[in-house]
Image (cartoon, rainbow, N blue to C red):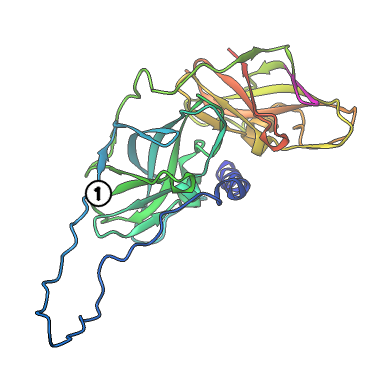
Amino acid sequence: MNRKRNAVTFVALAVLLLVSLACGSSASPTLVATSAPPVDSGSQPEQPTQVPTAVTQQNYKVGDVVSIGDHVLVVLGWENVQPNDFSKPDAGKKFVAVELLIVNNSQSAMSVSTLLQMSMKDDTGQKYDVDFMASSAIGGASVDGELAPGEKVRGKVGFQVPENATGLQFVFDASVFGSGKVFVDLGAEPVTVEPPANIAGETSQQTYNVGDVIAMGTTNLTVNEVLYPAGDDFNKPNAGFKFLVVDITIENTGATAISVSTLLQMSVKDSSGQKFDVDLMASAASGGTSPDGEIAPGEKLRGQVGFQVPENATGLVFVFDADVWGSGKVFVALT
């Protein structure tokens, strides 16, 4: 059930970002050579054909900190992902996950879309798009969504590639923002590196506390309390993880109705920037109801939102993305 939920969340986030990302600029085509033979006038000697100078693609390595436009990108490694009962690769193929970290090095919010901006290639040049089933098998959250100025996000992206594929290369396409592409050679064997201690452009976000009433335009948000339900025999967290439930109240102080979506607007991050999406099993373990749906003018709605986080996670922060209302993001410290 968790895997199916992750796939639904992945699709919903990708669709939400299509409008905001699809209008970026792209390079114009340039004529390099023509196959038409030169016209012989009979009076001039034939001129030698000028061979265009080859352009060498710049490739980076796992662990390199790469700045492109307003993005700072670090690929932290990759791994082969084991399939599960709900997510299995096609015959002769395997799931691969690439872990990366992105910082918004600008003064305005920006959106990241794995579907539109990320792909993989092998040494034949064959391209592989982000794979929903592979992303579901990973079990963690992707880096999709809005990034506030100076914000950092860490996550994994899933692909499905042939079992015998070689020369795998991760491709980040920032051309939707007019900035070109980044190519990262992954190497022959899975590898993981530690993230850098400091990354250019990263800044501390304004963080609120549990119990604070936070105004975002005509919407007030309050994190009332944080719970850690144990679950039961039929509903338990994954090994090494625990359920975390955030009890929140949302009040509409405006004159028009607003809509709330826990899947699209809420997440949790740890001190490394690792993002965790809403987990339906954790929400069920809370015994409450999520605050999804329309909130009428003057209405106040309380609900519980569940997540799965590592047992040893530190610096947990609840993140509410109110961009659909044009009000930015809110960060609330949970620990």
Q: x, y percentage for residue 223?
A: 71, 18
Residue with the most extreme front position: 43
Whether residue 123 is visible to the viewer of this picture, yes or no, is yes
Q: Nearer the viewer, residue 242 or 97?
A: 97
Magenta stretch: helix, strand or loop mostly: strand
Q: Nearer the viewer, residue 329 or 93?
A: 329
Q: x, y percentage for residue 105?
A: 46, 28
Residue type, numbered disc 1: Gln
Q: Is residue 73 above or below residue 210?
A: below
Q: Which picture quadrant has residue 3?
A: top right
Q: Nearer the viewer, residue 272 or 27?
A: 27
Q: Which residue is mark 1?
A: 57
Q: For the C terminus, which image quadrant?
A: top right
Q: Is residue 234 magenta?
A: no
Q: Is residue 218 above or below residue 187?
A: above
Q: Nearer the viewer, residue 50 or 308?
A: 50
Using a 10 Å C-alpha cutoff, classify the residue at mark 1 as few (fewer than 14 neighbours), some (14 to 19) or many (20 or more).
few
Q: x, y percentage for residue 133?
A: 49, 51
The magenta-colored residue range is 215-223
Residue with the most extreme bottom position: 42
Q: For the N terminus, which image quadrant?
A: top right
Query: What residue is shown at x 31% (from left), y 66% (from top)?
Result: 31
67 on left or right of 318: left
Whether residue 234 is visible to the viewer of this picture, yes or no, is no
Q: Is residue 1 above or below residue 334?
A: below
